[in-house]
């Protein structure tokens, strides 16, 4: 709870002539319900600094100034700040990084070893890409600890926390701030004059605010600063104090540093947390928003880092927000469509009415491995299936499957061979507690079904996923939640379905449309906008980022489960399969260095598509101001364009 004195001076009515606040009693009251329309709203985005690297430092007890990076095979996936001082970034290989900083600790991520029952930190993992699979479990575990601590440090009945990825959360502080405001300024609890909630509040009885060590975003003119503080400034200051306390708790109790942004909405708070790193917090007051945004490129904004950002930049021939601010809304609508136009117009003005969503439930879990070299036998495949089942099962346990809190309805196996992907799905038998053996048996069964279809070796990728999560008897749906409803049951049981997708084909109209789906776009936007400043934009790093984003930065709908590995060792076969010399991804325009990186990138898209399928279109409907005209069809079918030539059925995950 904030305790330090934050206000300097106190002189009721002091000011430059304006005797009333610009805010009303009603707007103040709206804070209690987290209303997105209150101009007094305060949202914070908290992001862990060099997260995986910090996890390893905490685990190993590394001194704070020791340069450390997290290694995955020969690449780096996280670099701590002391190591960044040497110019080391995610684009570096381990060898390069060690040249730049000989005292660097390069800690390899934990891996599942083929045939093992559990992941572990293996010293020789880096040279065993063929037989090991990366496990992000240690980081998920830390992520949960941090999230739990953040929640603990907020009042139980006045908190709204959204896990936005493995290392970040949004916190809507509005209700808590409302309660603190009323404690500190009891006059605010008085009924409004004439009992009219549209009456303006009195001005805050203070003239200067103490922002302590916060990075305060400047204003563009001195006059704006000269204006006395209003309630939005006081509210955001209290928010900043709460966040400072949260960060201190996380630091003190479990040793992690994080950075935060505090502003009036999610979009601005996210820009704020990345503004100054590490271990700092940035406050963007309403009066500073225009100045903060106008120097920025439009592509830095959430959802505008990907295709939409490119489109905007090319249509208006600029990526400068300052220049775009001069474009009338009518013109934006004409060029981008009604919804997107309005959305962009608002967004560059710092307006974002999206809610902090505390109900973040996992919708699917995926465990996958790309094989380099390719695998050739059922035995090998089965050994991986065992790992996938164990991996997914341990995450299911976290999800409460043993207590019947939630459980998935379907299980899916995807198999890639010679550029063709086959997939089989089956219902997970209900009525008894789900265990690892059942998952493993189901997976084997699906594998056998795929094997009946024809040539399946060598295999380049296997992915096992579970989806269709439902609340169990201890959840709020009651026992009915476990019973499949007529249609659903029929479609799941009648036959496991088949799908052949050629990820290299150009002729995939449905999939093309999916790329325009704002869900993916948002996802890609995030992927290309969150690179660390030292990355230098290396394509390799960018490709990597895509993968890791899948693994670690679940899109706003919060499936924290998808896990795809990027394994980039070369195989001849692979290269032959790809009659491509320009390794630009036709979907997101990422430029990849070589055939393997390209293939690996396509794997990622494929996994992402799967996830999108599972998520369905429902989440898009939650998006208040997004570019709705880009909404994809509710269900998507895919055409086989190569191989058997069979038309295949919908990949509809129930
Ligand atoms: N991550 C990754 N590869 C990427 C992006 C992210 O493996 N291309 C992982 C990182 O290991 C990272 C975590 O996801 O620790 C969170 O990513 P992000 O917040 O983007 O970067 P951080 O490493 O936390 O660094 P920063 O201090 O800039 O937030
Ligand atoms: Ca981070
Ligand atoms: Ca992050």
Image: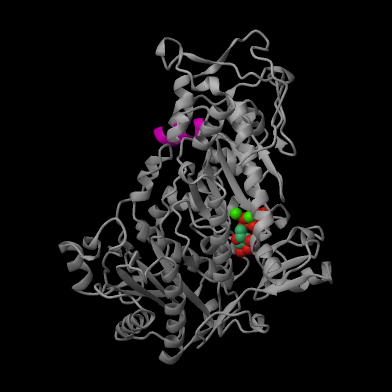
Residue 418 appears in view: no
**50 displayed left or right of 140:** right
Residue 515 appears in view: yes
Would you place residue 145 above or below residue 462 in this image?
above
Would you place residue 196 above or below residue 624 in this image?
above
* Residue 397 locus on image (x, y percent): 42, 71
The one of 308 and 187 positioned closer to us in this rendering: 187
Residue 314 is drawn in which quadrant? top right
Examine the structure image and report whether residue 337 is included in the region drawn in magenta: yes
* Residue 429 locus on image (x, y percent): 25, 75
Q: Which residues are magenta?
A: 336-346
* Residue 177 locus on image (x, y percent): 54, 34
**The image quadrant in which ligand 3 is located:** bottom right
The one of 336 and 431 positioned closer to us in this rendering: 431
Quadrant containing the C terminus in the rendered view:
bottom left
Furthest toward the left, the residue is 486
Would you place residue 127 above or below residue 506 in this image?
below
Q: How many marks?
A: 0
**499 displayed left or right of 372:** left
Identity of the residue drawn at 61% across and 51% down: 47
Colour mode? Answer: one colour
**154 displayed left or right of 490:** right
Examine the structure image and report whether residue 301 is included in the region drawn in magenta: no
Identity of the residue drawn at 57% across and 68% down: 581
Furthest toward the top, the residue is 17
The one of 198 and 123 positioned closer to us in this rendering: 198
Residue 458 is drawn in which quadrant? bottom left
Quadrant containing the N terminus in the rendered view:
top right
- Magenta stretch, overall SS: helix
* Residue 371 locus on image (x, y percent): 52, 80
């Amino acid at each position: 709870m904030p305790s330090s004195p934050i206000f300097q001076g106190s002189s009721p009515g002091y000011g430059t002539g304006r005797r009333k606040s610009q805010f009303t009693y009603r707007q103040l009251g709206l804070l209690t319900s987290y209303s997105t329309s209150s101009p007094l709203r305060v949202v914070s985005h908290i992001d862990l600094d060099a997260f995986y690297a910090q996890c390893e430092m905490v685990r190993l007890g590394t001194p704070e100034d020791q340069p450390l990076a997290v290694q995955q095979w020969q690449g780096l996936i996280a670099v701590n700040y002391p190591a960044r001082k040497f110019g080391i970034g995610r684009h570096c290989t381990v060898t390069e990084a060690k040249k730049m900083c000989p005292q660097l600790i390069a800690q390899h991520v934990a891996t599942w070893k083929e045939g093992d029952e559990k992941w572990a930190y293996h010293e020789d993992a880096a040279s065993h890409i063929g037989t090991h699979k990366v496990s992000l479990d240690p980081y998920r575990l830390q992520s949960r600890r941090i999230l739990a601590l953040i929640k603990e440090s907020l009042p139980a009945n006045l908190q709204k926390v959204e896990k936005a990825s493995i290392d970040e959360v949004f916190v809507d502080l509005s209700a808590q701030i409302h309660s603190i405001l009323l404690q500190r300024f009891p006059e605010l609890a008085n009924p409004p004059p004439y009992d009219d909630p549209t009456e303006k509040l009195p001005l805050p009885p203070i003239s200067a605010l103490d922002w302590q060590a916060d990075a305060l975003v400047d204003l563009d003119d001195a006059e704006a600063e000269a204006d006395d503080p209003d309630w939005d400034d006081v509210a955001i200051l209290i928010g900043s104090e709460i966040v400072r306390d949260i960060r201190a708790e996380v630091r003190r109790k479990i040793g992690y540093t994080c950075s935060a942004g505090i502003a009036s909405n999610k979009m601005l708070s996210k820009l704020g947390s990345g503004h100054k790193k590490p271990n700092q917090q940035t406050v963007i007051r309403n009066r500073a928003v225009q100045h903060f945004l106008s120097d920025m490129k439009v592509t830095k904004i959430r959802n505008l880092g990907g295709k939409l950002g490119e489109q905007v930049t090319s249509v208006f021939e600029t990526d400068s927000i300052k220049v775009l601010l001069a474009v009338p809304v009518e013109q934006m609508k004409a060029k981008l469509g009604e919804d997107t136009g309005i959305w962009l117009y608002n967004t560059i003005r710092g307006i974002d009415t999206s809610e902090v969503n505390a109900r973040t439930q996992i919708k699917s879990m995926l465990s996958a491995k790309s094989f380099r070299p390719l695998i050739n036998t059922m035995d090998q495949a089965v050994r991986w299936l065992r790992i996938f089942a164990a991996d997914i099962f341990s995450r299911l346990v976290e999800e409460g499957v043993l207590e019947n809190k939630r459980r998935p309805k379907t299980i899916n196996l995807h198999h890639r061979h010679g550029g063709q992907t086959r997939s089989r799905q089956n219902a997970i038998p209900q009525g008894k507690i789900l265990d690892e053996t059942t998952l493993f048996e189901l997976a084997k069964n699906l594998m056998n079904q795929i094997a009946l279809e024809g040539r399946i070796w060598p295999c380049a990728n296997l992915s096992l996923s579970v989806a269709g999560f439902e609340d169990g008897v201890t959840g709020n749906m009651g026992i009915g939640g476990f019973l499949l409803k007529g249609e659903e049951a029929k479609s799941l049981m009648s036959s496991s379905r088949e799908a052949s997708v050629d990820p290299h084909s150009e002729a995939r109209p449905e999939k093309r449309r999916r790329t325009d789906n704002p869900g993916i776009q948002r996802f890609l936007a995030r992927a290309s906008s969150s690179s660390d400043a030292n990355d230098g934009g290396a394509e390799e790093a960018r490709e990597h980022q895509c993968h890791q984003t899948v693994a670690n930065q679940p899109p706003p709908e919060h499936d924290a489960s998808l896990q795809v590995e990027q394994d980039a060792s070369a195989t001849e076969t692979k290269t032959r399969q790809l009659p491509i010399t320009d390794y630009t991804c036709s979907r997101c325009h990422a430029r990849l260095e070589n055939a393997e990186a390209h293939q690996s990138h396509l794997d990622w898209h494929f996994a992402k598509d799967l996830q999108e399928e599972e998520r369905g279109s429902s989440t898009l409907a939650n998006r208040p101001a997004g570019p709705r005209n880009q909404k994809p069809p509710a269900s998507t079918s895919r055409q086989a364009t190569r191989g058997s030539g069979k038309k295949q059925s919908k990949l509809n995950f129930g």
